[in-house]
Amino acid sequence: MEEREANKIISTIITHDGAFHLDDVLACFMLKKIYPHANIVRTRNEDIIKTGDIVVDVGGVFDPANFKYDHHQRGFNQTYNDNYDIKMSSAGLVYKYHGMQFIKALGLDVHPDFDYLLLLGLLYETYFVSVDANDNGVDISDDVRYNERTLDNVIRSFVPFDIPEGESIEYGDKVRYEAFEKAMEYIGSDLVRHCKYLMHQINKDKMPILQSFNQMKDPRSRYIIMGSGAYPAKELIQYYNTSLNRNVSIIIYKIRSREGTIYKLLCIPKKGIRYTPEIPLCEEWRGLRNEQMRRFPKLKKASFVHATGFCGSAMDLETAEYMAQKSIEEYLKKTV
């Protein structure tokens, strides 16, 4: 992450005209938040492009010192950092060089000791890397089971497709510019909500998760025990697995209910995967609850395991730990 000049006067932000995409819409939204008085000009006219204070997704130049953020030119190979092999789009570039300014421009109420660097890393990992991959034609998987409507699809739906033939070029530009502004407002609200969500998760879970990692009896262990609290942030677990070189796959945490204390087990998906846990709870327990669970000798206090094995619960910590350990053993036997 590199800081930009906070006091630089920006009056014109230039991006390309014609159809717009997720990356240029996001890039312009962030810049407009940072420089609210700047005008956005959509053009491919080289003479006009040269006059821009900031140029994104057009112009054929990557020069962050002079606020030029195109990524289409031959030889461009910039990634967010060495942990990624996906080249950045204009959104990733603007985020890399203006991300801190953008977050602070949101004016959100944060603690003086708030960990902005953690937020910046999480926000790229959970939001911008997919934007960069999408714009560079990198599929999420080689074997996709179904098509999912993405943010890029939503933004493409804002692009006017019914401008009548025979209308002037100026009319078409006006209609597309208005649609571009609506797309910015839409995607911007999503990005801001996600920022707020991550800020909340960091404030709530950062210290408990770090304490749980530090209290692990064996750093090679695949599960951790957290204190009381709500559903812990999977994104933070994945982040600290990478940054602390751990491999935690199951979290045990407790909640209070009308029936008393319940110990929940949450199985963490692999990085970049939304649902499928790396280590699910044992197959023979899945879809069972209460008395069905208690027919197993060491599960007299077990309550439930989801049919997919991604979560479960028990009435005491000893049972919850056994469920985690047994599931990890089963997984390791299958992978040897």
Image (cartoon, rainbow, N blue to C red):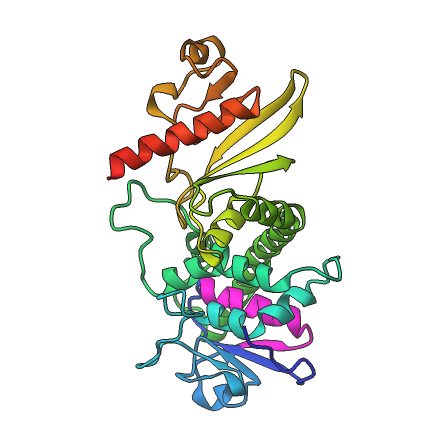
Quadrant (top left/top right/bottom left/bottom right) for the N terminus: bottom right
Quadrant (top left/top right/bottom left/bottom right) for the C terminus: top left
Residue 175: in sight, yes or no?
no
Dominant SS of magenta comes to: helix
Could you tell me which residue is drawn at 57 percent across and 40 percent down?
A: 232
Q: Is residue 176 above or below residue 154?
A: below
Q: Position of residue 138 (x, y in %)?
A: 32, 60
Near-viewer residue (310 or 133): 310
Q: What segment is highlighted magenta in the picture? A: 22-42
Q: Is residue 312 above or below residue 100?
A: above
Residue 277 in magenta stretch: no
Q: Is residue 195 above or below residue 310?
A: below
Q: Position of residue 90 (x, y in %)?
A: 46, 71
Q: Position of residue 37 (x, y in %)?
A: 69, 76
The quarter holding residue 75 reads bottom left
Could you tell me which residue is drawn at 59 percent across and 50 percent down?
A: 210
Q: Position of residue 223 (x, y in %)?
A: 47, 38
| Horizontal arrangement in the rendering, residue 51 relative to residue 136 (left or right) | right
